[in-house]
Amino acid sequence: MHTHAPTPAETKGSAPTVRTLIDEFLADQAATAVQRFSRAHTTIDLPDDTRPRFYRDLVPAAPPGPGQQYAFEVDLDACSGCKACVVACERLNGLPSGTSFRSVGTLTGGETRALPVLRNVTTACHHCVEPGCLSGCPVDAYEKDAITGIVRHLDDQCIGCQYCTLTCPYEVPVYDTDRGIVRKCDLCQDRLSVGEAPACAQACPTQAIRIRVVDVDEAIREAADGWPFAAPDASTTLPTTAYRSTENLRDDVHAVDRGAIAPAHAHPPLTVMLVLTQVAVGTLVGLVAMDWLPGTSSVELASLPLAVIALATGVLAMGASVLHLGRPLYAWRAVIGIGHSWLSREIVAFGVFAPLTGIYAVAVAGWTPLAPYAGWLGPLAAGAGLVGVSTSVMVYAVTGRRWWSLSRVAGRFALTTGLGGTAVLLAFTSVLAAAGHADVQTSMKPLAMTASALGILGLAAEAALLRHRHRPLDDELARTAQLLHGPLRRLVGIRSALLVLGTIVAPWLAVNMATSQTPSLTAGAVAGVVALLAVLVAELLERWRFFTASSPTRMPGRLP
């Protein structure tokens, strides 16, 4: 126990007061940065010219001025990896056990040097100049303070869609399952406002974490130079955190956890939503195309049922997407960010597609006021659906992940749209043929050919991806390929088998059964339905893989 001699004031008229070490700590924390500077400056005997260099507190003595903002500064040489910052962040913010806004990783390497390198990296929100979380949020639940530059999350506005965790390259926002919302570091803004350091900086025993005031232009220049170690591309959001070290950490140094790959979260509601919206759009596009393409018969008998199927599938998909939200009752807020969020645009696009498809269904049903317009209502609804699929592509392409690059996502979603629509049309025409409508049989062969071509294309794309598994684990696609070849191998095999069944075996079996000299129309209808079911399950597995095989470059210590 630490004590000090009682002063006369303490002993006069009362028993001596004993101050514990905790009392000393509390008294020290009660002082502001300016007070501590003054105390250090006046009580320590140093030459005048060395005083300014001697004292350096955890927070700046003055707030940011015009063109400036607060930012973290981390001394990698001082960080011991003790994780006191992680615990302090968790406790102060009342986070669930095992959850923190801050994480700690380790860099190692340099075996060719005189002394190998070992550095610890503590990381949290970087309060970027152009925050990806803010631009991606569909409900405007983020704001960047105009004075301090702190990126704050507005808990009351959040609906728990978790899209910000995808648009943030550093996966900073943390989903709180108890509250159903996302939360993140706000640089302990309430502490900074009274001159006190954030919890992580205050708890660090080596003072490796500090707060600095940085010129925004300087932060942009530093971000353009990139991180001093392997990490996500800093040029996308322009983070302001500065990492300092006397060692060169760019060459032959890597994060200890770079090879730690594990399947990511599958997001089942989004898996269902993406597949069903694309099947709905593909069905309507295929229905419209059937009347235009040469070599196919008119499917007037199928127009109303297929339009209803497309509508029902789209509505079911949007219902499934709501289950993804932590606060589904506030789903209506998701259109607020239409000016900057692709997720908002996706919701609006499919919100237009569904009613247009319903109006088209009413028109083809023969309702007199709308019947004359059926010829252009169908293409209009199909066009809205294609816009919706395009926005779905952009929702993931803007995250910057190589597995979700624009070309890969566009090709994958287009394949699901084409396969889903073709499978629905083939199944329905085979059922119509079994019901005695022989005129639709001529449409079955072109549909089977389309399904087979798309299926072969999908199988070839999957095989081409696996070649990346032999590359170094620093490559994102190498990690994805290893996931597909390892933990997700069974899923990939089942999907491939279903794709062969649904696009090659069952479709041609249905065609042969329906068009042979001794047709078996019932068996052909069964084969057509089997093809549809196989395609649906195969695409659901593909979309499950789409999420779980994502392994982006992370900050050291940011495990999946």
Image (tube, helix red, strand yellow):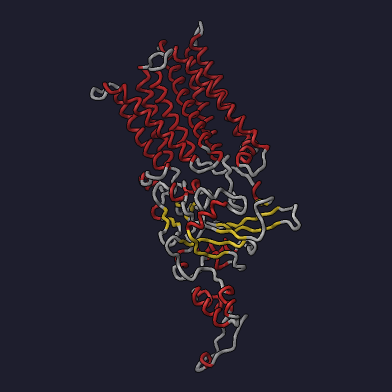
**Going 49% across and 75% down the picture, which residue do you hit?**
34
Please name whichever residue, 357 or 31, is drawn nearer the observer in this view of the structure: 31
> Residue 261: horizontal and vertical position, in percent?
63, 44
Residue 151 left/right relative to 76: left
Q: Is residue 228 visible?
A: yes
Q: Residue at x 62, y 50 (%)?
A: 230
Write the residue at 55% across / 20% down.
Answer: 504
Using the rendered view, name the quadrant where residue 210 is placed.
bottom right
Position of residue 73 in the picture relative to residue 364 (left or right): right
Q: Is residue 554 above or below residue 54?
A: above
Relative to residue 19, is residue 148 depicted above or below? above
* Residue 27, x across and y down, in percent: 52, 78
Q: Residue at x 39, y 48 (%)?
A: 139
Does 403 sit above or below residue 419? Answer: below
Seen from the viewer's position, the closer of residues 9 and 535 is 9
Residue most extreme to the left: 369
Coordinates of residue 512 in the picture (x, y in percent): 52, 12
